[in-house]
Every structure is written in structure tokens, then in C-alpha cells.
Amino acid sequence: MRQVRSRFVLAGVVSSLALVSGCVSSVGDLPLPGGADLGDDPYTVTIEFADVLDLVPQSAVKVNDVSVGRVTKVELDGWKAKVTVKVSGDVVLPDQAVASIRQTSILGEKFVSLAPPEEGGGEVGRLDDGDLIPLARSGNAPEIETVLASMSLVLNGGALGKAQVISRELNTAFKGRESDMRTLVRRLDEFLEVADDSREDIVTAIEQIDRLAKNTNDQKQAIDAALDDLPGALTTVNQQRANLVKMLEALSELGAVGSDVIIKSKTAVTADLRALAPILDNLGSAGDALITSLEVLPTFPFPDSLLGKTPQEAKNYQMGDYLNVSLNFETDFSTTIGLMNDAERRALKEALRGDDVSGVLAKSVVAP
């Protein structure tokens, strides 16, 4: 009887396994006992990780340490891992939610933790079906293996021994120089204060450098062409080296001569400039009168009122118009002769063949 019953139980188990194997592709597709209830309308979210450690499908997905979903797929996408999770439709997360891989305990299993972003971490919205949490919003909690390895390195004389050496060297360097170190720290503090006050100027300088770099990049072709032509130009300069040296030597001699001339003529030039100063002062005092006289000079002795104030009026006179001009000549021969020098007087006297100059002039004035 027991043998028959055992056969029935074995047959039932085999039938169940066959039925299950027809519905799922592997045992890994079966949900773990005690997993989260996804409800009737779960949504799917894809998360990118740099490293998923030993995370496996069917691992839990938690929010505030409460299971709200499970991992359905872990796959490789280029140089990053892509994890697909299903979350209960009753769970509301912001559109900018962050994800991390954590561990339930020191030796516990891995799970995916979802959380809202930090305060001010993005626009308000809801994480929905088909959304992607990119690599920038995902990460891993510190692994216990990493912590233990770091502690082992420190305790076994790694970083701790180096810190001891650094401390000993610093004590040796600062011994007897405490006042200098205090002065250095004070000056560093002053320097940082000045740098902080000049922060806007520093930012402006950096922006100017950036603008210069952009302009240089825009002129890349011209710079490349100039660099290509530069070897030829340098070759030409090198070929003309002897002539350039001679020219520079000649310029040196010219400079020496010019300096000597300037030094020797300094007194005369200074005197000329001082003598010129009153003339310039008088010209400056003349002002508008000088400018007005320069306007009248080309048409002297005919004023603008007579010739016209415009080129067209002057042209009309030239084309056949007439002018009424009244001229008065006043001559004082005594004054004229008085202005002559001795040579001019002798020449005039010889021209008049010895006659008395004043008498001749007087006769010429009274003669009808």
C-alpha cells in the first residue's frame, strides 16, 4: 500500500515539474518565496550601473527598506550593466529617482534600493513604466570586502606607516621654525582673502582666456598656414643674417651720431624753442582774428562783400560781371627814403646823377 502511495506521489511531483517546465524557461525565472507583491499593474524600470557586483535576477527591489518589486533581468550593455526591475504599481517615485545596490547585512544578499533625489534634485514628475535611471543617478554602497581590505592595509603598516613617516618628517622640518610657520600660515590666510575678494576678476580672466582659446581655435587654419610658412621665413632670415648684422651695426652708429648731435645741439634747440614760445603765445592770442585774416588773404585787396561770399558769386563776376573799385594811394616820399638803407640811398642818388634827391622829389610832387 505504501509502495503504491509513493508511486502516486512521485508521479504527481514529476507531473508538476513537467507542467512548470512548460511554463517557465528556467528555475531562475521563478519568484522567490516571500517576495514583494507586485499587484495587478506593476511597471518596469531600467537602471544603468557601472558594476552590479553579484546581483542576480529575482533579487528584491526596496524603497525605504521595504520590498516593492524584484529584479527581472541583468544584462551587459557595452561597458555598463543594465538591470530591469518590476515595481508595484502602488509605489510612487519621482521622475528623478536614484538607484543603488545595497546589502541586507554583512553577509546578506544584494538588493536594489530606489529613493527620491536629494532636495532640489530635479523637476517634479512620476517614475513611470519604461523609464530609465541613467548611470549618473545610480551607484553602489561600500562593500564589506572593500572596507576590510582597506582596514587591513592600514593596520598592516600600509598607510599608517606612511603617515608616521610624514609626521616625523614634518616635525623635523618645522623644528625651530615655529614662528616662520605661523607667519607663513598668516600670509597664506591673507593671500586667500585677497583671492576671494578678487574672485570676480579671476573668473573674468578665465573667461577671457576661454574666449582667447576659442578665437585661436577659430583661426586654426590661419595659424597652421603661418606655422607652415615659418620655416621658409626663418631660412630667409638666416640667409640675410650678415646683412641684418651690418644693418644693426649701422643703426648703432647712427644712434651714436644722433645722440651726439642731440647732446651738442641741446642748448641751441632749447633756446630756439624758448624764443618760439612768445610767437606761439601771440598766435594763440590772435585766435579767430588770425583765421579771419587767412580767409581774406587770397582775395586781398577785394573783400568778400565785393567778390561774393560763395564760389557761384565769384564765378558770375568772372563770366563778365563788372566791379566798381575805388583805390586811394598815399605815398610819403620822405618816409620812404627814410626807410632806405645807405646802399639804397647811394644807388638812388647815382641814378639821379648827383641831383638833390629831396629837391627832385619835391619838384615831381608839385609839377603839374
Image (cartoon, helix red, strand yellow):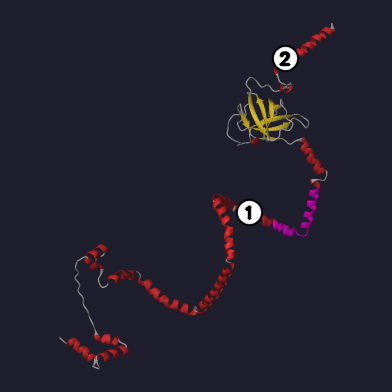
In front here: 3 or 253? 253
Extreme residue toward the bottom, this view: 354
Residue 281 visible, this angle: yes
The picture quadrant where one finds residue 320 is: bottom left
Q: Which residues are magenta?
A: 161-184
Query: Residue tagged by mark 1?
Result: 193
| Residue 182 in magenta stretch | yes
First-in-chain label (1 vs 2): 2
Can you give x and y, in whole percent of width and height, for residue 146 in the image? 77, 38
Can you give x and y, in whole percent of width and height, for residue 45 in the image? 64, 28
Tell me if residue 76 comes above or below residue 299 in the rendering: above
Tell me if residue 365 comes above or below residue 187 in the rendering: below
Amino acid type, callout 2: Leu
Q: Residue at x 22, y 64 (%)?
A: 316
Q: Residue at x 77, y 57 (%)?
A: 173
| Residue 107 in magenta stretch | no
Query: Residue tagged by mark 2?
Result: 19
Can you give x and y, in whole percent of width and height, for residue 254 in the image? 53, 74
Q: Taking 296 as reference, is 84 left or right?
A: right
How many other residues sit within 10 Å of disc 1, few (<14), some (14-19) or many (≥20)? few
Quarter of the image with the N terminus is top right
C-beta proximity under 8 Å, tags 1 and 2? no
How many other residues sit within 10 Å of disc 2, few (<14), some (14-19) or many (≥20)? few
Q: Residue at x 75, y 35 (%)?
A: 143
